[in-house]
Image (tube, rainbow, N blue to C red):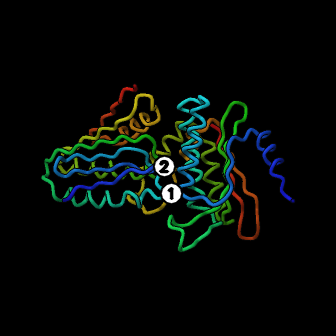
Amino acid sequence: VESLFVESTKSSPYVHFDPQLHVLEIRGESYPENAAKFYAPMFAWLEEYFASVDNDQSIEVNMEIVYFNSSSSKVFMNFFELLQDAVVAGKNVVVNWRCHEDNETALECGEEFMEDLQNLTFNLIEIPGD
Amino acid sequence: MTFNLYDFYLNLRRGGIIFCFSGPVSQSIVEGIGETIKQKMELEDAGVGVTQKVFAIFVEQMQNVLNHSVERITDESVKEGELRLGVLVVGQEDDRFYVFCGNKIEREKIGFLKENLDMLRGMDKEQLKNLYRERRKAVRGEGSRGAGLGFIEMARKACKPIEYDFSLIDDNHAFFSIRVII
C-alpha cells in the first residue's frame, strides 16, 4: 500500500496516511462541497491498508480539525466506526483528537465523538495557545 | 431607473444588515464570503465563540443553497459543477447576530421541511444533542450530499428556535427562507 497524501485547501484538510509509520493524519478545515466524495479515496485507501497490515498492528490517528461542517461530521463518524471495527478485529488503534485550547467548539466536538465510540481509544489533546 | 441602489443601501443599514448576498452560489463563494465574515467579526471583537457559530451556520445555509436550490445554472464550462441561486444576509438585532438565507424549492418539499423544522423548534438543547448523535450514527456510508444533520447543527448553535417561511411562487415552486439567531 502506498502512502496517501492530499494537499489542504481553504475548505478541505491536509491528509497524510503513512503505511510505513502507521500514522494517519488529517489536519485543517473540513467543509468541502461534497464531503462524501472528498473523503471517498480515504476510505478506499483504508480498506486496502487494513487488509494488508498484521492483525495486532499499532496504528496512530492524529486529527486536528479547526472547523468541520455537518456532512464532514457524518464522514468522520463513519471513519471512526471503521477504526473501531479494526480494534474489534484485533488492531491497536489510538485516535488523538487535537485542538487549540481556545477552540472550545472543536474540543466539545471531540468529546461528543469520544462518548459515541466506547471501543476506541480516543484522546483529547489540547494544544496550548501562544 | 427602477432600482435605486442608495435606497437599497440605506434599507440594509437601517435593518442592521452587515452582509448581503444575492446570486449564484459556488463553493468558492462560500469559502470567500465565509473568510470575510470571520475577519470582519474578529476585527470587531465579536468573540471567538460567536464568530465560530455565525461561520458554521453561514456554511450550512450556503451549502444548503448549493445542494438544494432549484434555481440553477448548469453549463459544461462551469468547472465547479452547478451554480445555484440564493439570497443570504447576516445581520444584527438586539445585540444578537443572525444568518438569514433563502432559495427557491419545489413545493412538494414544503411538508417535509416544515415537519422537520417544527420538530427541531420544539426541542431543547439536550434533545437536539441526542438527535444529532442518533442521526450521525445511523446509516453508514450513505452517498447523500447533505447528511441531514445541517438543520440540527444550526438549531444547536442558535439561541432561539429556528424561524422559517415559505412563500408560494407558482404551482410547483416556493421560496424557502430560514433565519437562525445566534
Q: Which residue is mark 1?
A: B146
Evaluate whether residue A49 shows in this view. Answer: yes
Q: Which mark is residue A70?
A: 2
* Circle 1 residues within 10 Å: few <14, some 14–19, many ≥20: many
Verify CB contact (< 8 Å) between mark 1 and mark 2. yes
- Which chain is disc 2 placed on? A
* Circle 2 residues within 10 Å: few <14, some 14–19, many ≥20: many
Relative to B22, residue B127 above or below: above
Tell me what residue is drawn at x 22 percent, y 47 percent: A87
- Image coords of residue A77 (percent x, y): 38, 49
Amino acid type for the residue under numbered disc 2: Ser
Q: Quadrant of the N terminus of chain B?
A: bottom right
Relative to A62, residue B66 above or below: below
- Image coords of residue A88 (percent x, y): 22, 48
Tell me what residue is drawn at x 56 percent, y 42 percent: B55
Evaluate whether residue B162 shows in this view. Answer: no
